């Protein structure tokens, strides 16, 4: 009894100390934010345990050593990335997780996603949490995204350690190749069956959660899924805002575009803190949230403990409130997905092409979706017809290119604005010089032409043999395997050097077009 009472006293003292530590010290090694803080306990479910910053930072030190021992970074496909995967994997296995390495075959270099599931709770109702584990080449990537990776790892370890009674399934993911265009998470989504996809009730993303000049951003902040994350910040009295800077720039976009509810936490990248934000959050107005974004100085010295501690405890709150004990289910929202086929169209000046636009109701009830296309350069007309559908319906994107348009690659974005959410899908329009560009006398594949077995086309630098009848089946995309076989195009060696260095760290996909032989 004595012993118990003294423990309670310690907890109470810690709770009292909360506002002081959080408000004044950016270098505190623990940020105390427990439920002992008072009556504002969670509405349902068992209380989440406290996640300490010290534990999270131990993983960050390991990522830093891994980068140091592997040429200074952990970019996808590098030895530093593989060593990071091994580190996380070994920690999870030791804690009792079933862990899978999923080699990503559509990533820029050989790299794998790491997926771990805690065995308990309803497998038909999965809450996923994820963070990208790759860095850019410029540095070790401590904040981007060692921070999210280490945080998700520590929450996974805490779940194993506490081993509570589970109502729902929790799955954790560390993504490959986010920095080159969300490739690891997109690959994961592309391999899910419909049943697997619908079992994922929500995805929470953690990318850059320890920025030194931190903001407190939540993705899709007013959606039901974001509520448990937001409730944590509300409870500790920290104002949160929508993550505007990060829209479509991290792995939650892969889930959102597949019609899966998504949210997450971020402390900001290269955008600047406004005066109003500095007023409410502290820090420096008119300075970047992360002064070392995509730079060599993104080391463990670029980690701020306060936002890190808050983000990992918000993460634990979400896991415990949705998946543990007597918890509330992840909310269902009406949701839809948007996709285009093919993803790219090659059109000669004066020509035209059509692309199929489809929507699918992925949860809840069907909703009206307005469809529009943007990004067409002067001389290109692009329109979607019909311009609105009920989710589940299809439309056609028609593109016509006037004779004056210069050859080049123009990204088009199809946007579907629904009642509950907005989805985007990209189409790459390549305007060729004169007749469809080919290679070595073989003409380029076009979406509008009908092909028969035995036809040969060139597409994105490779030679393809048609093995069946098709129109609009793009060579090389997963759905076209039965139609086109890769006939080993020319081997092209691209030397990366000064000319490509300018693109390093743009966090967007880029295409290297190689012409001639
Ligand atoms: N983490 C970045 C993507 C990004 C850019 N701005 C934000 C804001 C908040 C979260 C993420 C981002 C990257 O991976 O490069
Ligand atoms: Zn990132
Ligand atoms: Zn990045």
Image: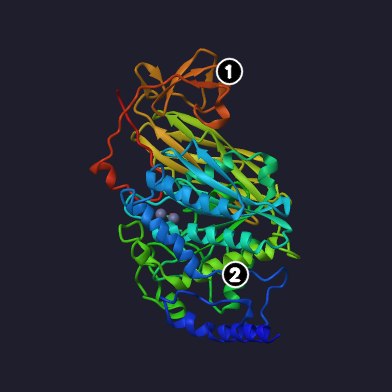
The mark lying in front, picked from 1 and 2, is 2
Q: In which quarter of the image is ligand 1?
A: bottom left
Q: Which colour scheme is used?
A: rainbow
The residue depicted at 54 percent of the width and 14 percent of the height is 453
Which circle marks residue 469 in the picture? Answer: 1
Q: What label sits on residue 84 in the rendered view?
A: none
Percent x, y of residue 27: 41, 75
Residue 357 placement: quadrant: top right
Q: Compared with residue 286, is residue 258 higher up or lower down, i.e. above or below?
A: above
x%, y% of residue 256? 58, 51
- Neighbourhood count class around disc 2 (C-alpha, 10 Å): few under 14, some 14–19, many 20 upward: many
Quadrant (top left, top right, bottom left, bottom right) of the N terminus: bottom right
- Which residue sits at x=43%, y=50%? 134
Q: Residues within 10 Å of mark 1 (few under 14, many from 20)?
A: some
Q: Nearer the viewer, residue 158 or 234?
A: 158
The residue under label 2 is 230
Left or right: where does residue 347 sit relative to residue 228? left
Where does residue 228 sit, x and y in percent of width and height? 64, 67
Q: In which image quadrant can residue 159 be found?
A: bottom right
Q: Is mark 2 on a helix, strand or loop?
A: helix
Which numbered disc flags the more N-terminal residue, 1 or 2? 2
Q: Is residue 127 visible?
A: yes
- Tell me where residue 363 appears, x and y as whole percent: 70, 50
Structural distance between the alpha carbons of marks 1 and 2: 52 Å
Q: In the image as oriented, which residue stretches furthest toward the top?
A: 454
Tag 1 secondary structure: loop
């Amino acid at each position: 009894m004595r012993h118990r009472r003294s423990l309670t006293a310690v907890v109470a003292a810690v709770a009292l100390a909360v506002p002081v530590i959080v408000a004044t010290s950016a270098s505190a090694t623990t940020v105390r934010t427990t439920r002992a803080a008072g009556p504002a306990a969670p509405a349902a479910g068992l209380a989440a345990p406290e996640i300490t910053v010290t534990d999270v930072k131990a993983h960050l030190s390991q990522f830093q050593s891994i980068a140091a021992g592997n040429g200074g970074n952990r970019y996808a496909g590098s030895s530093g990335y593989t060593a990071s995967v091994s580190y996380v994997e070994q920690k999870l296995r030791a804690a009792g997780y079933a862990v899978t390495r999923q080699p990503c075959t559509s990533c820029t270099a050989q790299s794998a996603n790491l997926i771990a599931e805690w065995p308990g709770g309803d497998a038909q109702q999965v809450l996923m949490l994820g963070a990208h584990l790759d860095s850019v080449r410029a540095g070790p990537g401590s904040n981007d995204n060692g921070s999210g990776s280490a945080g998700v790892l520590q929450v996974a370890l805490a779940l194993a350690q506490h081993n509570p009674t589970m109502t729902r399934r929790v799955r954790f993911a560390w993504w490959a190749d986010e920095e080159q265009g969300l490739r690891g998470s997109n690959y994961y989504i592309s391999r899910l069956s419909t049943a697997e996809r619908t079992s994922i009730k929500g995805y929470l993303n953690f990318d850059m959660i320890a920025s030194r000049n931190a903001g407190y951003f939540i993705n899709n902040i007013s959606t039901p899924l974001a509520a448990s994350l937001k409730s944590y910040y509300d409870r500790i009295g920290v104002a949160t805002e929508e993550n505007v800077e990060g829209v479509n720039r991290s792995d939650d976009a892969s889930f959102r575009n597949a019609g899966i509810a998504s949210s997450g936490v971020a402390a900001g990248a290269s955008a600047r803190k406004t005066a109003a934000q500095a007023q409410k959050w502290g820090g420096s107005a008119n300075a970047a949230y992360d002064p070392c974004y995509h730079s060599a100085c993104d080391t463990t010295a670029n980690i701020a403990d306060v936002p890190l501690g808050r983000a990992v405890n918000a993460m634990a709150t979400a896991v415990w409130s949705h998946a543990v004990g007597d918890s509330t289910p992840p909310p269902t929202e009406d949701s839809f997905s948007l996709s285009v086929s093919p993803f790219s169209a090659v059109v000669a000046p004066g020509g035209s092409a059509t692309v199929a636009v489809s929507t699918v109701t992925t949860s809840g009830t069907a909703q009206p979706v307005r469809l529009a296309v943007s990004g067409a350069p002067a001389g290109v007309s692009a329109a979607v017809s019909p311009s609105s559908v009920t989710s589940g319906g299809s439309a056609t994107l028609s593109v016509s290119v006037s004779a004056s348009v210069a050859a080049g690659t123009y990204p088009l974005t199809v946007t579907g604005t629904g009642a509950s959410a907005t989805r985007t899908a990209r189409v790459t329009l390549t305007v060729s010089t004169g007749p469809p560009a080919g290679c070595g006398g073989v003409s380029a594949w076009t979406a509008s032409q009908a092909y028969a077995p035995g036809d040969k086309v060139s597409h994105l630098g490779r030679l393809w043999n048609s093995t069946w009848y098709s129109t609009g089946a793009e060579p090389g995309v997963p759905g076209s395997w039965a139609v086109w076989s890769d006939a080993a195009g020319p081997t092209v060696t691209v030397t990366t050097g000064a000319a490509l260095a300018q693109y390093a760290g743009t966090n967007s996909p880029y295409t290297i077009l190689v012409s001639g032989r």
